[in-house]
Amino acid sequence: MVEKSIHISLSAEKIGTFLGVPVTNTMLMSFIVFAILWTLAYFVRKNLSLVPGRLQTLIETLFVGILDYMTETLEDEKLARKLFPLIVTIFLFIFTANLIEFTPGIGSIGWSHPGGEFTPLLRSMNTDLNTTLALTIIAFVVIEVVGVATLGFLRYSKKFVNLSSVLGFMVGIIELFSEVARLVSYSFRLFGNIFAGEVMILVIQHFVPMVLPVPIMLFEVFVGFIQAAIFALLTLFFVKMAITEAH
Amino acid sequence: MEQIVSIFGINWKLLLIQGLNFGLLLAVLYKFLYKPVLSMVDTRRAKIENAIHNAEKAETELGQAEAEKARILREATTKGDELIGAAKKHAETAEISIMKDAHRKAVHLLNEAERRVNREHDEMMEKAEREVARMAILSAEKILRKA
C-alpha cells in the first residue's frame, strides 16, 4: 500500500493566481459548466423554428410546464415570467455541474506536490462552499428584493418587526432569524450533499475500486438532480412566502 | 467564524467571481434560450389562436351566407308563384272575354244570316207569287185563244 490515507480537503484547491485573484479548480469547473450551457443554448436557438422538432418540443414542454407551475405557485403570471430565467438557470447550473462531476478526468487529472499532496485540476463545482454560497446570496437577494418590490418596504418589514403584541414581536424575531439562517441552510445543504457524495465515492473506490462505485455514482447523479431541483424550488417557495403578506 | 471561513476556503473574491459567473450565465441563457423559446411558444400560440378565430369567423359567415341563400330562394319561389297566379288569372279573364266576344259575334252573325235568309225567302215567295200569277194569266189567255 503506497497510499496510506484518503486526502480530503473541504476547501477547493488553488491552482494558480490571475491578476491577484486566486484561481481554484472549482472555479475552472464552473467556467466549463458555463461553456457547456452556452453551447447547448446556442444550438437550441439555432434550430428554433415555428414548426418544432423533437428537441424543441421537449424543451418547450419543459419550459411551459415549469412556467405554468411557477404561475400556479406564485399566483402572478408576470412575476413568474420575470423569475423564470433565474429559477431555471439555478436548476440548470447546479444540475449540469452535478451531472458531469463523474466525468473521467475530473478529480483525477492534476499534479502531486513533493509532500505527497495531490491537487486536481478540476473539482466538482458544488463541493466548494464559495459556489453554493454565491448562489445562495443571489437567491437571498432576489427573494428580499422581490418581497420588498411586491409588498413595499413598510409592509414587508412588518413581517419582522411587529410591535402589536409581545407574541407578534417574538414571531417577528424568529422570522428574521430563519430568514438569515436560510443563507446557511441553503449553501450547506447543497455543498454537504454533493461533497458527501464525492467523499463516499472516494472511500468506496479506495476499498472496492471496480464495480461497486457505479450504482453509487448513479445514485449520486440522482442526488445531484434532487439537490438542483430543491435549490430552485426552495427559491421559488421563499419568493412566494416573501410576497405573501404577514397575517 | 474565522475558522469556518478558512476551513471552507471562503474568499470574497471567489464568491464574487462565482456570482458574476452565474449572473453572466443567466444573461446568456436568457438571451439564447429562455427568451427565444418562450417567444416562439407565444408566437405559435398567437398564430393558432388567430387561425381558430378565423375559422370560427368563416364558419359564421358561411352560416349567414347559407341563410341568405335560403331566404333569397324562398322569396324567389313566392314571387314566382305570385307571378304565375297573376298570369293565370289574367289569362282566365282574357279567355272569358274572348269567349264572350266570340259568342256575341257568333250570335250576331247567326241573326244576320237568319234575317238575310228570311228576307230572301220573302223576296223569293213574292217573286214566285208574281210568276205564278203571270203564268196563270198566260195560261188563261192561251186557253181562251184556243177556245
Image: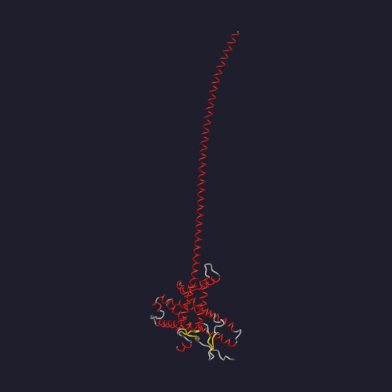
Q: Measuring from the top left, give residue A86's x and y in whole percent.
A: 47, 76
State how many labels appear.
Answer: 0
Tell whether B79 sits left or right of A208.
Answer: left
Q: Nearer the viewer, residue A172 or A150?
A: A150
Q: Residue A162's quadrant in the figure?
A: bottom left
Looking at the picture, does residue B125 appear above or below residue B100?
above
Q: Nearer the viewer, residue A79 or A99?
A: A99
Looking at the picture, does residue B33 appear above or below residue B106?
below
The colour style of the image is: secondary structure
Q: Measuring from the top left, give residue A20's x and y in whole percent.
A: 45, 85
Q: Residue most toward the top?
A: B147
Looking at the picture, does residue B45 appear above or below residue B142?
below
Q: Measuring from the top left, give residue A90's x and y in whole percent.
A: 49, 78
Tell whether B35 sits left or right of A207.
Answer: left
Q: Quadrant of the N terminus of chain A?
A: bottom right
Q: Residue A153's quadrant in the figure?
A: bottom left
Q: Measuring from the top left, give residue B21's x and y in whole percent.
A: 47, 79
Q: Quadrant of the C terminus of chain A?
A: bottom left
Q: Residue A4's quadrant in the figure?
A: bottom right
Q: Residue most toward the front?
A: A19
